[in-house]
Image: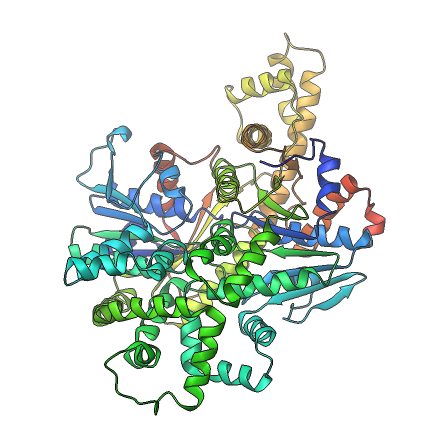
Amino acid sequence: MAETDGGSPTKIARGLLEARLILITGKGGTGKTTFASALALLAALRGKRVLLLEIDSQRPALTPVFGVAPTYEPQQIRDNLEIANLTWQEALQSFLASLVPSRRIVRLILSNRMVGRFLDFTPGSREIVTLSVLGDRVGDYDLVIADLPASGHAFSLLDITRSAMGLFRSGPVRHRAEELRELLTSPTTRMVLVSLPEEMVVNETIETYQKLDRYELISRPPVVFLNRATLPTFTDEERTLLGRLCNSELSPLADEFVRAGRWEDELEQATAASQARLLETLPEPPLLVPPAPPGGIPREVVGSVATHLGRLVGISRRELRWE
Amino acid sequence: MGVTRFNMEAWLDRTNLVVCVGAGGVGKTTTAATLGLCGALRGRRVMVLTIDPARRLANSLGLKNIGNEQTQIDLEALGLSTDGELWAMMLDSRSTFDGLITRVSPDEVSRDRILNNHVYRHMADTFAGSQDYMATETLYDLVDSGSYDLIVLDTPPVKNALDFLESPGRLINFMDERVLRWFLHPYDANAVFGGKLMMGTSAVVFRLLAYVFGRDFLEDLATFFQDFQGLYEGFVARNDAVVKLFRDPGTSFVTICAPTESSLDVAVFFQEELKRRELPRGGIIVNQVHTCEGEQHDAKEILGALTRTLSEDLSPNTAATLLARLGMAHRRLRALGQAEAALARRVRACGAGGGFYQEIPRLDGNVHDLESLHEVGRRLLVPADVL
């Protein structure tokens, strides 16, 4: 395993923004898009030209965040920040165009029904083409942030760079797979895993890390965000008293308060347990991010997370000009 | 008021196949396991089948691992007697695929030729969609075996579409004879086409594919399809049977979500998709709902005296600081409950006419053993709202 950034949340967060390519994944519902968007906003404010993209989404998650549906061609949505959706058809077109000089021939290939079926089914062709176009974008920006699918599918996507070696033994696709593997393991490429203080989510985070590490798809430790973390506030004595209240006869109204207290206490303990498990299995400590206020629309949730991460990298809420 | 309620027990008793759909992270696997357990406790022979690449089903059944084999879950730990059985299985696409090839191959030589083919090995191992093909294969086998009264299918977390319903169609599309013939003829030694068919567009396109993907790869692919050709009819027949099964009145698609903006968005989308495809909608389950009924009250007024009595041996401030914390926690929980209720109204509206609507309150602690599943099950089977 490669070197770590040595501990402190500030160092880890600042180090992350030095990357050229950030790949974000995590179990479904953990907040991948939120973190991708928040990091993109912060990097753009630090003066980097940023491209934030989704991979072949039929219903882009970035739409409710920025109020604009991302298209294949990057669109600028604020200073230094562009968003895009790497749709498969368009990705294929530009992939072929990069290999075949004649536009007419590219059109000929794309309009052939058999080719459509061939590519639809051929294992790995979709993944390689999409990743390849993603790789091409990296040179055009200071930072590309990719909001990948949920961890199982994201792993299949990245792993294609390895399995393609056995599958495609010659030709440009093979060559692209080799280049992409180099890109994934480059020291300026960082993996971000978004996790939650829940046992099963933490398990999946750990499994994802172990698989990426085992198959050498990463060269640096992933940055793990423990989202919706509740920091400890209860003192031992308060917890003792809460326990005594739980064992007492309570009116329904009093019970509501005690139940709320137990809920909060459990959230704190779940956070502490998740943090401990991540600490013992991952090379770097997770960064804890508190929950956004309830009922927030995606844009507000992004604002809340960006504000929190902004503190780590020295960007104030005012500079963010977001909510 | 005499509002009609939806009888969840009767629904579960008359259903033979439950397909759980929804976004990731909403407790879909736990709900599938719970429905399975409920069915078993009601005396039925139940199989819970997950095609989720993560090992969540095993987790929620309190097991370390469940493999590609049908595994019976020991219900005695619950101390409840039932004639029913609970089985679970996690789809491993590689073993299922290998099993399928072994079954349909005419002899050992052709079997080994397919199993050792580069393309086959990569397709079975790494192709993201192969799980979906195999899910329908396995489902077909399980139904065909007649061993189960109820099958609960937990689908992978796809956010875009009911992909797993479509993938077998994609395979069949490709295996279509015309496509195969087009694709195979440059490699078919017996074909007589003397350059005529391969002139023009086809030849150009083919040469380009060979250039882009490499000639070796196309040859591997051709060998694979030549060997696979004989299996085509079997695939079509099985796929047709599964498509019919999905439309059967004994089948119920249940949309599962959590009270969060993003998962409800996906739930709304699934409702639309199920309607569009005319698939039987069983209902909607909203998991992990926070409830906090109480009005805004002063914690000190309600709990002041009791906390003082209970904290006599603790530091002097403990009662006061805990009360402040309880007040804050209560406000937070109420705000959360209200925000969730507002979100839930949206998904209810789009589910109209589609079976039941059931909210499951959030349980204290993680659900990862049979007892807590049983607890969730009790809440799941209480009469629900009618959509």
**Depicted B145 relative to depicted A294: above or below:** below
The quarter holding residue A137 reads bottom right
Can residue B279 be seen from the camera position used here?
A: no
**Depicted A157 relative to depicted B222: above or below:** above
| Residue B354: image location, x then y, percent | 39, 64
Q: Is residue B161 left or right of residue B58?
A: right
Which color scheme does this rendered protein use? rainbow
The quarter holding residue B238 reads bottom left
| Residue B171: image location, x then y, percent | 34, 69
Q: Quadrant of the C terminus of chain A?
A: bottom right
The quarter holding residue B122 reads bottom left
Rendered residue at 26%/46% (across/down): B39
| Residue B61: image location, x then y, percent | 35, 37
Choose between B324 and B128: the one closer to the eye.
B128
Can residue B18 be seen from the camera position used here?
A: yes
**Depicted A94 relative to depicted A25: above or below:** below
In the picture as drawn, the residue positioned furthest to the top comes out as B313
Rendered residue at 69%/64% (across/down): A83
Q: Is residue B20 left or right of residue B103?
A: right
Q: Is residue A141 left or right of residue B219?
A: right
Q: Quadrant of the N terminus of chain A?
A: top right
Q: Is residue A217 left or right of residue B8?
A: right
Choose between B230 and B250: the one closer to the eye.
B230
| Residue B81: image location, x then y, percent | 20, 33
Choose between A17 and A228: the one closer to the eye.
A17
Rendered residue at 25%/28% (across/down): B79
| Count of numbered labels shown in the rendering | 0
In the picture as drawn, the residue positioned furthest to the right comes out as A318
Choose between B380 and B197: the one closer to the eye.
B197
